[in-house]
Image: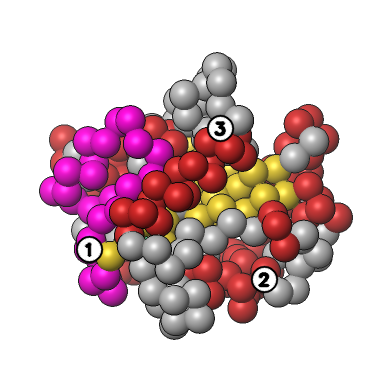
Amino acid sequence: MTNKQITIIEPNAAGLARKGAEIFSRAAKESVDKRGRFAVAISGGSTPRSMHRMLGEEPFYSKTDIFWTDERCVPNNHPDSNFGAAKKDFLDRIPIPKGHIHPLQKGLSPEKGALWYQQKLIKFFQQKEHKFPLFDLIFLGIGTDGHTASLFPGQKALDEMERLVISVKGGDPYVSRITMTFPVLNHAKRIIFMVSGKNKADIVKTIFEFPKARLPAQRIQSLNGTLTWLLDNESASMLSKEHLHEKY
Ligand code: 6PG
């Protein structure tokens, strides 16, 4: 299995969302054709929302299971809930069986919630030969501090190599969170970073051009497939030419 890295730069946020939705649909159709199902993990924050709103009502949803890379420990109807946002943006609209939607938040304590979700992943992926779940597709964002999912700089969560899901505290909003760990994220067949806007240009440059920074987002390394950076002109605006990989 190759581990390839690709950079795609779209002219603007709308183009980025369209490309993201296109990649989502293509990966879904391919996975359902090949494996009879599509297991995807989506991230939170503001960047993926316009992509989620563009996702169409497609037949592959009957064989699709949606998980989250991370969640803030707030009620599902709270404005900071990643599940709540996705529900508004597309989950209430698409033809997906209710049992195929797997929110993280169950009103348990963060640590119990993390263990509960870990069990859910183990059961869903019936892991035998593979120690870690093999998602077909994972979407990630990055923060201006280089965090991804809810894996924040300087936290011991970054060194977790056994657990699939852990609880942490951090980020904006600064709350308890539940997050998938690097081994789970890095075993996905397709990993897509979606990054938009001028305020991310600096951190994108650091991630691409200063590997020694060892930021959480730099520890996303595809072990089983492809890692795609989906940027817009603004977030890619500080990248120097030689650091651009294959460009579509
Ligand atoms: C979260 C996210 C987080 C997000 C980045 C970027 O729940 O906070 O999963 O990792 O992707 O913070 O957020 P924005 O897209 O809002 O800039």
Badge 1 density bin: few <14, some 14–19, many ≥20, Cα 10 Å:
some
Residue 176 visible within the image: yes
Distance (Cα) linking label 3 and label 2: 24 Å
What label does residue 134 carry, if any? 3
What label does residue 170 carry, if any? 1
Classified by dominant secondary structure, the portion drawn in magenta counts as loop
Distance (Cα) linking label 2 and label 1: 27 Å
Q: Quadrant of residue 144?
A: bottom left
Indicate which disc, 2 or 1, sits on the residue closer to the N terminus: 2
Where is residue 6 shown, x and y percent of the image?
50, 37
Q: Quadrant of the C terminus?
A: top right
Residue at screen point 55% across, 17% down = 129
State how many labels appear.
3
- Tell me: 104 left or right of 182: right
Tell me the kind of residue under disc 2: Phe
Helix, strand or loop at label 2? It is helix
* Residues shaded magenta: 146-175
Tell me the kind of residue under disc 3: Leu
Q: Which residue is mark 2?
A: 90
Residue at screen point 56% across, 27% down = 127
